[in-house]
Amino acid sequence: MELGNTSVRLVNPAASSAPESPASASYGLKSGSLSPSETLAQSVALIAPTGAPVMTIPLVFGLAGQGVAIAFLISTVGVLLVALNVNQFARISSSPGSLYTYITDHMHPRWGVLAGWALLIAYVGTAAAVGAGVTNYANVILRDRFGVQAFPVLLTALVMVVACYLAYRDVKISARLMLWLEAASVALISLIAFSIIIKHGWRLDMGQLTLQGVTPEKLRLGLVLAIFSSVGFESATSLGSEARNPLTSIPRAVKWSAILAGVFFFLCAYAEVLGFRGEAQTLGESVAPLHLLAQKAGFPAWVGTLTDLGAVLSFFSCFLACITAAARVLFLMGRHGALHSVLGQAHLANQTPHRAVLLSSIAAFLPAAVMMLQGRNLFDIYGLIGTLATFGFVTAYILVSAAAPLFLRSRGCLTPQAIGISILAILAMGAALLGNLYPVPAAPYSYLPYLYLGLLLSGFAWSTIWIARAPALAAEPL
């Protein structure tokens, strides 16, 4: 159907199970322009693998001690369970809406709108968090090399403007940039990690593997942040209209980004705990852990600076990936009538969701900028907004895992194994959610669940009112 110049795709959960034609659902975006490696780059960049060794692993160590590597191993298993559920959909249909589309099509549209807002909070929140990461490590380089510091808000604004331009201009340019930035950064950090392990003599560090001194409570708290490191693996699904052979390339991107990130995080966590053993400063206290590791591995001082540069580039590519994914969720919600139809329009020349890109970029900049102006520490900004974003991801992952069996049943191919995977994924994500709620963390983290719930319900109410003004836009009344 059409309302004005906005075309709306309606999906009936009981409709034919034939795969959706990507060409028929291009929505004015650049159809088939991204290669499989560029599609993979979207998921890898949003995971921001360099971010874990430089910021998240020290934070997890502060909570879980020697249980860091095991926490990342467990989180990878949980994420892979969700990935298996996501791929039940990704092998059959493609669209720009990421998990929002899957949940809308195979559960009641109310759940789809809720998932859409959860994803928007997740993607925008992650962008805001990594914006603080870019600023932190850019200032580390400026301080160490030039003895100066830049005003954090200006650096974050620069990140926003450059990323917004790239996402606005051409999805292919931004995907290629993300691919090369992450590949170079991960290669350098892997070299340092392997050097530390080789220097240790290949002896297993039994203190880590046997969780020496680690209580279940500490491991659970560390697990929550470890899961945050892997979220975003599903974001390749937001390129359903732009990926080449999306029914093949997107499922591969979802699966392999989760696996490769998990292996990389386990390697880095193991090596960092090993490398900091016996040091006066603990891993949890370090603001630039790879500097010390590079030095202990025998690399020259400039390699440490390169790791800081790698962190800047990785966080930047994550910011770019976040606004790319968020814009496509906004874009499809606008076309479905859950938001203003102006967001559902694509740029005629660039074939990008330009208005949605602009809105998601501004939304990512504002919370980080406000907290910087309040004088908050950049690590605190990363942790606080990142935790808020995790609530959004976990909500969407629970919903898509619940939708997968319904989807398979509609196609007549539901199996006990699929039901088991769905249940395990929901339990894993539910445990992660519970870990953020109980026992009640110290302020200001204790306020985050209420803030998230307020944002989620406000967005859901806004979309409900918006659709009520034009109920013909919805596949079912909200």
Image (spheres, rainbow, N blue to C red):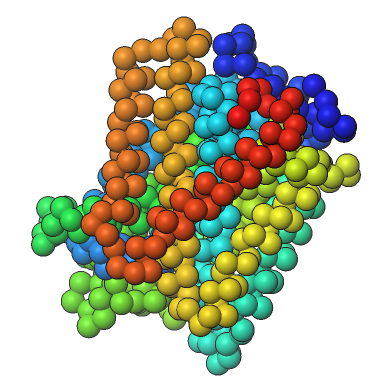
Res. 167 in view: no
Q: Is residue 70 above or below residue 312?
A: above
Q: Is residue 99 above or below residue 310?
A: above
Q: Residue at x 42, y 44 (%)?
A: 394
- Compared across the picture, whether 475 is left or right of 119 comes to right
- Compared across the picture, whether 407 is left or right of 172 comes to left
Camera-side residue: 333 or 401?
333
Camera-side residue: 4 or 332?
4
Q: Is residue 376 above or below residue 70?
A: below
Q: Position of residue 15 (x, y in %)?
A: 61, 11
Q: Position of residue 430 (x, y in %)?
A: 32, 41
Camera-side residue: 287 or 125?
125
Q: Is residue 435 above or below residue 258?
A: below
- Compared across the picture, whether 290 is left or right of 375 comes to left
Which image quarter is the C terminus in?
top right
Q: Position of residue 213 (x, y in %)?
A: 11, 62
Camera-side residue: 10 or 319?
10
Res. 394 in view: yes
Q: Residue at x 70, y 39 (%)?
A: 466
